[in-house]
Image (tube, helix red, strand yellow):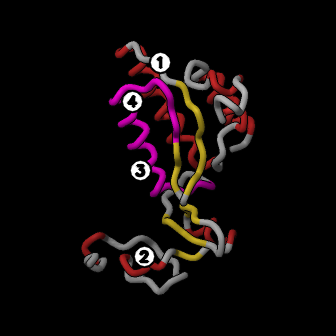
Amino acid sequence: MRQELTQRLYDTYPDLFVGKNETVMTNLMPFGLECDDGWYGIIDKACAHLLRLAELEGAHPKFMQIKSKFGGLRMYMAGATELQYIIVKYTETESHHICEACGEGGHMRSSKYWVSVLCDKHANEQGYAITAEAAKYLNLKEGEYRELPTPSSVRTIT
């Protein structure tokens, strides 16, 4: 994530990002947010919920690492309550449908070495094909792009 967006999160939610000042032996936040700008919005929203829950529940978690892994957002925390972890898991799941590059709707795509969630524009620009599993579900040929069909028009998963 661009430094300016990372810094905006650090400034808005300093209690959640206290680990950025620790050594990498104890916390990986000194590496910053290891994902692209498109997920800034869902991370910001998650942080707002986590901060509100910290006020209500009295638990003050901190991020240990935020990164892209296997095409999805991963948010690792220490000291979170069950409800705070639910917010984190919900956000991670939401990332599977949001372009990591721009924040618009996206699909899981694969390149030769990497998996990402990208919109059609960024998938084409970056040379990603839609995954075989997603292509089968969406009635697409592998690598074909088009508007997401209605759920009733897709194949049943078997």
> Which residue is denoted by mark 4 in the rendering?
84
Q: Please tell me whether residue 59 belongs to the stretch shown in magenta.
A: no
**Mark with earlier residue (1, 3):** 1
Name the element at disc 1. loop
**Mark with earlier residue (1, 4):** 1
Kind of residue sitting beneath label 2: Glu
- Residue 15: x and y in percent read 57, 18
Q: Is residue 41 above or below residue 22?
A: below
Q: Is residue 83 above or below residue 136?
A: above
Tell which of 67 and 140 is nearer to you. Answer: 67
Q: Residue at x 60, y 37 (%)?
A: 65
Q: Please identify the quadrant where the C terminus is shown.
A: bottom left
- Residue 30: x and y in percent read 71, 32
- Neighbour tally class for label 2: few under 14, some 14-19, many 20 plus, Cα within 10 Å: few
CA separation in Å, label 4 and label 2: 31 Å
Name the element at disc 3. helix
Q: Is residue 98 left or right of residue 2?
A: left
> Which residue is denoted by mark 1 in the rendering?
60
**Mark with earlier residue (4, 2):** 4
As drawn, the label of residue 93 is 3
Is the C-beta separation of discs 1 and 3 under 8 Å?
no
- Neighbour tally class for label 3: few under 14, some 14-19, many 20 plus, Cα within 10 Å: some
**Mark with earlier residue (2, 1):** 1
CA separation in Å, label 1 and label 4: 10 Å
> Which residue is denoted by mark 2 in the rendering?
133
- The residue most toward the bottom is 141
